[in-house]
Image (cartoon, rainbow, N blue to C red):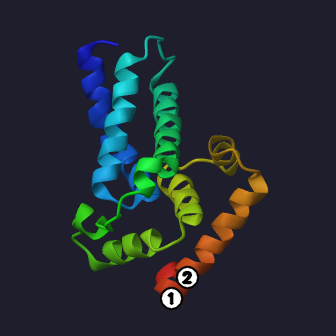
């Protein structure tokens, strides 16, 4: 991969991958560290990609795996975590901020499948494969997350 291609790839995927990492960590700085590791792996990766879609799927998988590894790391368990997701983004409309807060308030398992399903537009089968869980587990997590979001945001927000 040339330097120019790498830079284009980083610009194209930076925001998307950051949000995946943020959905795992709920910490801006940790998400940035994960993102840095993902792009470092891309830089060192020496096999060609078939197309941009193949590259994007590879990056998503690497980001999820890096995030899962970070969550399990003993280093993380010995540190006090500060929840700074509110400072991670600024929103023009209050409704976007409300939705963001509602999604970030979900338990990690539900938050992650919601992000992958709605924001990354991944199919249940692909999420199942990526997270190494059964499709029924993905569907259950989506159901629970939707139910909780409906409680947090209200019926009129969900239907409107």
- Residue at horizontal 37 percent and vertical 42 percent from the top: 34
Please state the horizontal and vertical placement of residue 137, each as a whole percent of the image: 74, 59
The residue under label 1 is 154
The residue under label 2 is 150
- Residue at horizontal 30 percent and vertical 22 percent from the top: 6
Relative side of 102 to 3, left or right: right
Q: Which of 151 and 45 is in front in this view?
A: 45
Please state the horizontal and vertical placement of residue 24, each as a whole percent of the image: 46, 55
Which class describes the residues within 10 Å of circle 2: few (<14), some (14-19), or many (20+)? some
Residue 160 seen: no
- Residue at horizontal 33 percent and vertical 68 percent from the top: 83
Q: What element carries label 1?
A: loop
Which class describes the residues within 10 Å of circle 1: few (<14), some (14-19), or many (20+)? few
C-beta proximity under 8 Å, tags 1 and 2: yes
Examine the image and state in which quarter residue 46 appears: top left
* Marks 1/2: CA–CA distance: 5 Å
Please state the horizontal and vertical placement of residue 18, each as a whole percent of the image: 35, 48
Relative side of 91 to 155, left or right: left
Q: What element carries label 2?
A: helix
Q: Which of 108 and 17 is in front in this view?
A: 108
């Amino acid at each position: 991969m040339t330097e120019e291609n790498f830079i284009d790839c980083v610009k194209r995927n930076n925001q998307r991958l950051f949000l995946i990492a943020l959905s795992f960590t709920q910490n801006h700085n940790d998400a940035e560290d994960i993102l840095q590791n993902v792009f470092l792996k891309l830089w060192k990766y020496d096999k060609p990609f078939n197309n941009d879609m193949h590259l994007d799927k590879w990056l998503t998988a690497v980001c999820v795996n890096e995030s899962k590894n970070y969550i399990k790391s003993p280093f993380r368990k010995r540190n006090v975590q500060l929840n700074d997701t509110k400072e991670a983004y600024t929103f023009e409309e209050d409704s976007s901020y409300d939705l963001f807060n509602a999604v970030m308030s979900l338990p990690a398992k539900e938050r992650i499948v919601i992000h992958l399903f709605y924001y990354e537009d991944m199919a249940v089968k692909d999420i199942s494969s990526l997270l190494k869980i059964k499709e029924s587990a993905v569907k259950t997590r989506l159901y629970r997350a939707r139910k909780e979001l409906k409680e947090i945001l209200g019926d009129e927000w969900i239907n409107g």
